[in-house]
Image (spheres, rainbow, N blue to C red):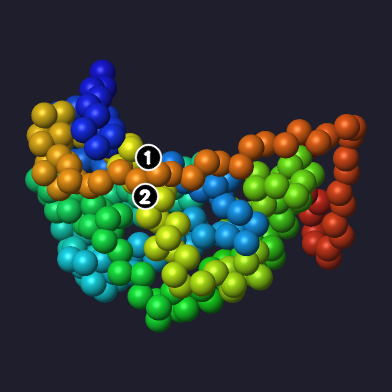
Amino acid sequence: MYEKTTLPNGLRIVTDSMPAIKSVAIVFYVGTGSRYEAPAQAGISHFLEHLLFKGSRRYPKARDISEKIEGIGGIMNAATDREVTSYWCKVASSHFLTALDVLGDMLRYPLLEPEEIERERLVIVEELRMTNDDPSARAEALLDELLWPNQALGRDIGGTEESVMALAPHSFGEYMAHQYSPQNIVVSVAGDISHRDVVKAIDYLLGDWIPSETLDWYPELDVQTGPHLHVEGRKTDQAHLFLA
């Protein structure tokens, strides 16, 4: 059975107490992703996810963040989709407060330093090229484009090389000020910890987070009037077919 509490600033907390498991998993679900991006912003949600691991107010270097979690035997990662971006960490239950502090500081006070932005920009471009080189991933992307042509749902979550290279450094803070708002976030905690202790800790750490106005997602435009087919030829040993 799960328990849920909403803080006065709108931050939702959902827990599942599992005393037999001597660890804790924490996930911050942020209501943002590629569906919230204008064409000129394509890829900014995914780019921002990368940047949050590059340093925050209390943990100014990427190494500080990784060592703080890995040094206590924990693991952490993140993922961006069309409608949600998630940041998660799993640690022994005795280190719950440490993990919560790291994730909370990353989401509230990322440094977004210009040199890190430029360094990560090239990393993301290489990720896009890697995806394009994978026939299965490329076929899936073509299917999305067929289903939702010329709209947010049909674009690659990572954007394009052109859009990623064009994102101005100041745009990340502006986008984050809208989307990374407490009423747009759900914190989920499962493991050997009580709901009361989780709420108390999160309220202490994030209870003063002031809400802001969030962006609306771009609606799905149903422009299909008949069957569509796209074939892209490559010199591969297999054919990759996606059907919807």
Q: Amino acid at mark 2?
A: Tyr
Give the spatial CA distance, label 2 vs label 1: 7 Å
Could you say which is closer to the camera, residue 181 or residue 105? 181
Instruction: Using the image as rendered, state which of residue 11 and residue 178 is in the foreground.
Output: 178
The answer to whether residue 55 is left or right of residue 164 is left
Left or right of 70: which side holds 167? Answer: right
Q: Quadrant of residue 26?
A: top left
Type of amino acid under label 1: Asn
Rendering coords of residue 65 (x, y %):
25, 65
Q: Position of residue 233 (x, y in %)?
A: 87, 60
Disc 2 + disc 1, Cβ < 8 Å:
yes
Is residue 23 shown above or below 50? Answer: above
Image quadrant where one finds the C terminus: top right
Q: Which residue is mark 2?
A: 180
Task: Check the image and name the residue furthest to the top.
Answer: 1
Q: For the N terminus, give its image quadrant.
A: top left
Residue that carries the numbered disc 1 in the rendered image: 184
Residue 43, picture quadrant: bottom right
Residue 105 horizontal/vertical position (percent): 23, 57
Q: Residue 239: in sight, yes or no?
A: yes
Which residue is found at the position 61% from the left and 54% from the top? 38
- Which residue corresponds to the image point at 40% horizontal and 44% vertical from the top-left? 213
> Residue drawn at (62%, 61%), measured in percent from left and top?
40
